[in-house]
Image (tube, rainbow, N blue to C red):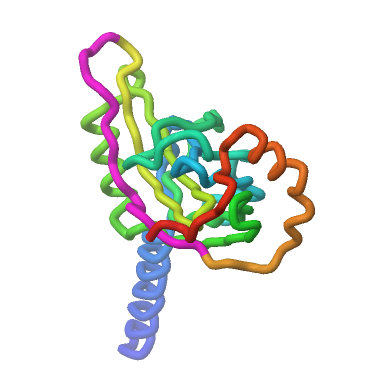
Amino acid sequence: MNSARISSIHHLLWLALLTALAGCASSPGPPYPYAVVTGGGPDGWPAWVEELRFDGAWGPPVGGVGGDISWDEPPSRGGLAVLGPLPVPRSMSARWFSHRTLTFYEIDLAFPEDTKKRVRAFYRDHPPPEYTHDLMVGISGDGRVRVWWRTWCGRDCGEDHVYLPIIKEAVGQQIEGDPSRYANRTAQQRERGRIPPDPEPPPR
């Protein structure tokens, strides 16, 4: 076999190896059992989430969030959606409406590169089925977003909720939209006392 042919074969082998490595790097990874929890806040900043997507492909229906709960780290509670075992997301996008300022927001977030590694270690330290896992998303009517991973013991193991921050805080971008579509819901929020009569600028 001549040297030119050997060099060509080596080149093809290197291309195949690099393609395989690239595929591994971009792989979504193994599925994990977890639910998605969506909440909001702070008090007085209710929102309506039109869309929440992970990796541009999947996400739970959300609707109304916040307005009557705290905006702690993380929010105190939220809606639960059990979607079955799924890979750890690499990105998140959302679009929502603020009842208080009558403005629309959207955001596109890339999760930190080490998210899969950190979540894998989190599962190793808190293994199912003894521990239940949730991906928590906080969306606020003041334009802010927060993301955590949470685990808690489904049995009497004497351990409280444990949180792994993914996105400590990000701010969405205001976009165009027709607030009249939410006029009835906004009026209901005011009637319930979830929006102050004299709106103030969003906290920063």
Residue 67 lies, in percent from the top left, at 53, 39
Compare residues 189 and 85 and report the one nearer the observer: 189
Residue at 54% of width from left, 31% of height from top? 79
- Residue 23 visible in the current orientation: yes
User: In the displayed structure, does residue 92 sit left or right of residue 188?
Assistant: left
Residue at 48% of width from left, 60% of height from top? 201
Residue at 35% of width from left, 19% of height from top? 129
Q: From this view, report whether residue 70 is shown above or below residue 4.
A: above
Q: From this view, report whether residue 164 is shown above or below residue 18.
A: above
Q: Does the magenta stretch include residue 26?
A: no
Residue 100 lies, in percent from the top left, at 59, 51
Q: In which quarter of the image is the N terminus?
A: bottom left
Q: Does the magenta stretch include residue 159?
A: yes
User: In the displayed structure, does residue 128 sit left or right of residue 23?
Assistant: left
Q: From this view, report whether residue 110 is shown above or below residue 48.
A: below
Residues in magenta, as a range: 156-172
Q: Quadrant of the C terminus?
A: bottom left
Compare residues 123 and 172 and report the one nearer the observer: 172
- Residue 24 visible in the current orientation: no
